[in-house]
Each structure stands twice: as structure tokens, then as C-alpha cells.
Image (cartoon, coloured by chain):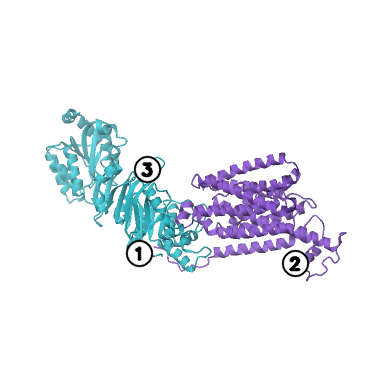
Chain colours: A cyan, B purple
Amino acid sequence: MTDPPSGAALRLRSVTVRYGARTALQDLDLEVPRGQFLALAGPNGSGKTTLLRAILGFVPLGQGSVELFGDELPSLSVAERARRVAWVPQEETPRDDVPLFDYVLYGRYAHLGRLQGESSTDREAAIRALRAVDLEGRARDGVLSVSGGERQRAILARALVQEAPLVLLDEPTSHLDIAHQIDLLTRVRELSRDRGVTIVAAMHDLNLAARYSDRIVVLSRGRRVADGPASSVLSEELLARVWGVVADLRRDPRSGTPYLLPHHLVAPVTPSPGAFLGRGPVHVVGGGGSAEPYLRALSESGYRVTAGVLHLLDSDLETAESLGGLTAVEVPFAPIGEEARSRLRTLLESATIVVVAPFPVGPSNLPNLEEVRRVLGRVPIVLVRRPPGVEWDFSGGRAKEIEEELRRGGAQDVTGPAELLAFLAAEPLLAKAQ
Amino acid sequence: MGTPSDRTPGPRPAGIRRVWVLALMIVALGVGVLLSPLLGTVAIAPSTVLMILFHQASGGALFPNPCAGASMPASGCSGLIEIVWDARLSEIMLAVVVGAALGISGGTLQGVFRNPLADPFLLGISSGGTLGTAVVVVFRIGVAEQNLLLPLFAFVGAIATGVVILIAARSRFGSVETLLLTGVALSSFLSAVLSLLLLYSPSGSLQVDFWLLGNLGSLDWTQDGIAFGVVLMAGTLLATYGRELNLLQLGSDVAQSLGVDARRVRVRLLLLASITTAAAVAFTGIIGFVGLVSPHVVRRVAGNDYRVVLPGAALVGAGFLLAARDLSLAAFPGSLLPIGIFTSFAGAPFFAYLLFRRRQTTTIGGP
């Protein structure tokens, strides 16, 4: 490996890039210290790829300068650049089918003399790199015959044998399954932590960026709008402002890194007619698909619906969101936390009526019933009768106690969506709200 | 991670196979060169031909009387020697050199343009060179110095074509499509200029017509020497760019990120291929399809590594043209069939086959 002079790995000074009339990067200053894993985030067209291409010298700068390890880019030969910075493009379209081994060995080019063949050291480096990306057994397979994900890993292997102290990755996980996403990013992080390699990676997945990078730079319309460690950069406000997405911010209980649960767009693209114009809102507590028939029946009859707390991946959540309803959401398999609970409280307080769907109750979702009990007497409550002979209370009897309490306090029993609609039609409160 | 493996790096069977393929091609070509003088417009006994060859090659030390037992023409043994050595062998060597030049140029251009259909003919480089030589023949410039003027004008024509392609490409940031389309347009344009020139030529139009079809006849060792020298130099230089061409197949940006100065290498290779092509067309006229077909034959046998494709295409091109010369003599003994007709007979069906096959697997031409 070359030993470049000391200083920052990468320094951009007021870099501006224009494509015709469009400004892709506007007056960007950026300094990346050695060994840092920097994630570039931002919506499509925000300038992430342009920034990487500017660092590689592929796009002419409108103004400003790029420095690699203390040297201005134009002062470096193409080969010297290749010894300092490696690039893992988002995708590559090789013209010819060559064995993966040869493909990876191409990474040694900048280290070889004009007529010098690859030595056994170079070959060993290629084998090691293929092993590192889990492709050792496929060294002889053609690059056009392997899958997109395998090719992406082979490209990473090629960047590894290039032994550059700065590695640029453009959406490195876009073609990978989740296991290989984690594996690749773990390796990239090791590269920066153990070997001091500087990483700049454009990443769409903010949660992966938060988990693996040291620093997140958020671009929007060619400008930097946020910069810092994930804990200070990621926020519900940022997601709404830059991506136009409503999300809940959580914390990964294991690593403590922030975690965003994206919800829906700030302005729903196709709001269902009932969502804003109809009667209600009717809040449905459910889960595991139990709320679906009630949500649909309500929405079709023109009621606005809200739902929750539902766990992410629950089919009821999908239904509620497709109907345009507001929901309270929790991470899969986790007990309902304080944030989701307070959101549920808000939704319950603003509901005209609350429907409790026949959902199985365990310790993790018991808070749903507890919160319903809190509004007893202030908001009318409808309980859907449980089908007989089916065990549903896994909370040690507490769920049954609460439901009994609700009945004593005036909650109505109904059987099925039709009866619910009939009940609602006769309900003066709802007629009044119309 | 990773499957346990005790496989060691080092030479792989595929690499060894490539070396063997090249070695085999060299041996086959050598045998072809040795046996080809047996064929010709005049019937000479095979044993006499071989004896003459060894006699001449050894400077007269071997077979001091090579014509023993042969039926002599009026000029005696020296007449036979002239036919076998000066006429046949020089023609054969020219076939080898020109075929090698066209093959390696075709391989290079296919790599530079990342397009399986690129070759000196398609891109107008052959036409440019031909136009240059046509000027010499039509206007009877320096009849005595034709051995030097023909290649010189061919170089000017071919290189000028290459430069025009490059200049046109420069305005669009070197996109490969632009280069290719410019070449195709230039090729049509130059052919039109050539036709116009022949239509209004004061003299020698038949000679140029015949020569346009591509032929190896009416040659001498000087032409061989000039062609051989140029092709050997430019071809050897080209062959050292195998690794760069391999990397260029990944796209200019990727190649650049790996350390290849893509634009500079492209310019250099295009100029070298133009020079090599010019050396070929200067003495033989337009011989089509050798540059197109030869690289594909090598790919089929030895894979896509340009370090093998380039020398391999030179060897296959040499063999192809030599075989075309031999077959045309065997099929039409005593005739002077222009060799360009023969290569097109064999090359055109292959071209069609290539088109058909490519369409089945992938789209043509997209870089």
C-alpha cells in the first residue's frame, strides 16, 4: 500500500458541479479524516453519486477543489489516483464474460508495471479478497453468469485488492440480501476500524447507515443539510423535512443506535375518500389481522379510521395505512414502549368511538387495553365478541379482567362488522359528528 | 465465511490452456507457410518446391541442385526459383503479414469500441487508407517510387480517418457510441469519394478496381519488408495493451478508477490500429472480414482475455488469409481471383451467424 502524506484523507473546498442548467452540488465543503466511515444520505437526485464522481475526477468541477491525502486531484496521475482511492460503483456492465478471479485481479492494475505480470502475491491477494466476500468457491465462474449480488461482492473484492486508503461505495447494499448487507457493511466497518481505511458510502438505508457509520452527511438538492454522528443527525424532523416522510424515531435496544420507523408520506399521495371527509374518527385496537374486517367495513361506509398500537409487519398495520388512517406503531416483537403508548393515547382521545377487535393479548400488547380503559366513560367503546373456545388471553388473566371492567363501564358488545355498522348508524354521537 | 479450500493460487489450467492455444496456432501457421508454396498458377512438383525453399533459405547450402528431375521452363532452374521463392513465398508472407495486421487491428478496435462488430473496414479506416493509395494509382504519382508512396499515402488516409473519428468524439466527451457512429458515417463518405475518383480517373481505373477487391499479386520483397516492419512494430506495441483493453471492457469510468487513463489509451490504440491497417491495405487493397472474424474465433477458443485475443487474432488472421489464398488457388487453379472476394465469401456468413447468435443472448453493440 502506498503511504500518502499525512492530513485529511479527503478535503472538498466549495465544490460546485453543474449538469447544464441544473446544479448537482452547490458550494460543498467537506473534510473526512483518515479511518472515518462516512455515510452519504439524501433523497434521489440529492447529489450523492455526483459527489462520489467528483472525488474520482469523473465530472468537471464548476468551481472548488478536491484534495486526496493532501494533493489536489488534477496534480495526480490516473494511476496514482487509483492507488489512493478505490470505487465500488452501484452497478457495472462488463462487456465480456471473464472469470471472477481475473475480474478481481484487475484491481492490481495500478500497482503493476507496464509489462509486469501479476505475481503470486497478487494472486493470493485476489483469493483472499474473494474469500472475504464469500465467493472463493466461485473464482472460476464468469462475471456475467453470477447474480447481481455476487457481482456486487466481486466488485468489492476488486476494490479490496486495489489496497487504496480511501474507498468510495455507491449504494453497496442495493443488490444484496439482508445477510449479505450486514456482512458487507461489517467488513467495510472493519476495514475502517482495523486498517484505517477511509470510507465514503452513499447509502439509501438510513438505519444501516446509522448502525455502521461513524458519521452521516445528509445532502438535499446538492447542499449539506445535516452532518454528524447518527445520534445527532437522525430525527423525525429531518425525515419529514428532507424526505417528506413521517417516521417514528426509536432506539435499537441492543446497540443504542437510533432507528427510524417510516410511516407514510407527509402528504399522502392517494388518500382514500373516507380518510378526511367522512365520519369519525373511529379508532380500532387490534393486531394479527383481527382488525382488518372492521377497518375495511368502516372505511367503506365512509368512516375515518385510526389504528394501533400495531407492530411493524403486522397485516393490520398495512390495512390501516392503505386506508389512509393514522396509526401508532411499534418495532416488531418488542413490548409497546412509552412513545407508541403516548401516540395511542392521542389517537384514543381524539376518537369519536373506540372499537376493540378480537385480537390475542399478551404482555407485550396489553398496554393497548390499559389505554382503552383510561378513556372509559369519556369515549364510547365497542367490544367485538371473542369467538367461543379460542384462547386469546396470554397475559395471565389481566386482559379478561380489563374487558370485564370495560363492559361494566358501559362498553357495547357486537358480533361482526355488520353489527358494528348497524350500531354506529344508530349512535347519536356519530350522527352529530357528521 | 468462506468455504474451506486448499486450492492454491498460481497458474490456473485456463491460463495454461491459453498458452497452448497460442503455441498451437503458431505451429499450424508455420506448417501452412511451408506447404502453401506448393500451390500456384504454374504446376511444379511438390518435391521440387520444397527443395527450392530449403535451398534458398539456407543460402544455397542445402540441395545445391534443387531443380534436379523437374521439368524446366525456358529460363531454367533460376526461373523455377523465381516462381517459388520470389513470387509464391513473397505473396504468402504478405498474406501472413496482412492477415495478422487486420486481425490484431480488428481485435483492438472491438476492444476500444466495446463492440463485437467493430473492425477497420466498418469504421472507415480501411477506406481512408484505400483512398490514399487510390490517389497514388489514379493520378500516377511517382510510378518509380510506388513501393514507398503507396504505404505513405495509405498511412495518411487511414490515420486521417482515425483522427477525424477522435476529433468528432472529443466534442461529446468521448462517448463510445459517438466514435462508432462517426466511423460508420466516415466509411460511407470515403467510399463515395473513392467511387467518384474512379469514375473520373484519367487512367488506370481497371487496375484500381481490381486492386480494390483485395489481392496479393504483383508483389516483391520490398513491399513485404515495408509491410512486415510496420506491422511488426505497431502490432507488438498493440499486443502490450491487452490488460488495458481488458479493463476498458468494464466501462471508461471503472477502467479509470482502476488506473487506466481511458481516453489517452483509446487515442493511442486507435492510432496504432490505423497504422497497422494502413500497412495492410497499402499493398493489398480492401480485404474484408478478416479483422471482424479473427478476434471472435480466438474468443471462442481461448476466452475474452485481450492479452490472448490480440496475439491470437493476429495468428488467426494470418492463417485465415493464407487459407483463403490457398483455397482460391486450389478451387480455381491458374486464375487470379482477388483474395478479397474469397474472404468475403467466408466472412459474410460468419458475420450473419454472429448477428443471429448475439441477438439471442444479448443486444448488439451497447457499450
Please name whichever residue, A48 or B150, is drawn nearer the observer in this view of the structure.
B150
- A23 w.r.t. B79: above or below: above
Check the residue under mark 2 and report the chain it is in.
B
State whether discs 1 and 2 lie on one chain: no
Up the image or down, A391 lies above or below A212; here it is above
Residue at the image point whose x is 76% and y is 43% from the top: B203
The residue that disc 3 covers is A23
Q: What's the amino acid at mark 3?
A: Thr
Front one among B326 and B67: B67
Residue labelled with disc 1: A195
Residue identifier under label 2: B57
Count of marks overlaid on the render: 3
Q: Quick check: A159 above or below B115?
A: below
Name which residue type carries label 2. Answer: Ala
Amino acid residing under circle 1: Arg
Q: Chain of mark 1?
A: A
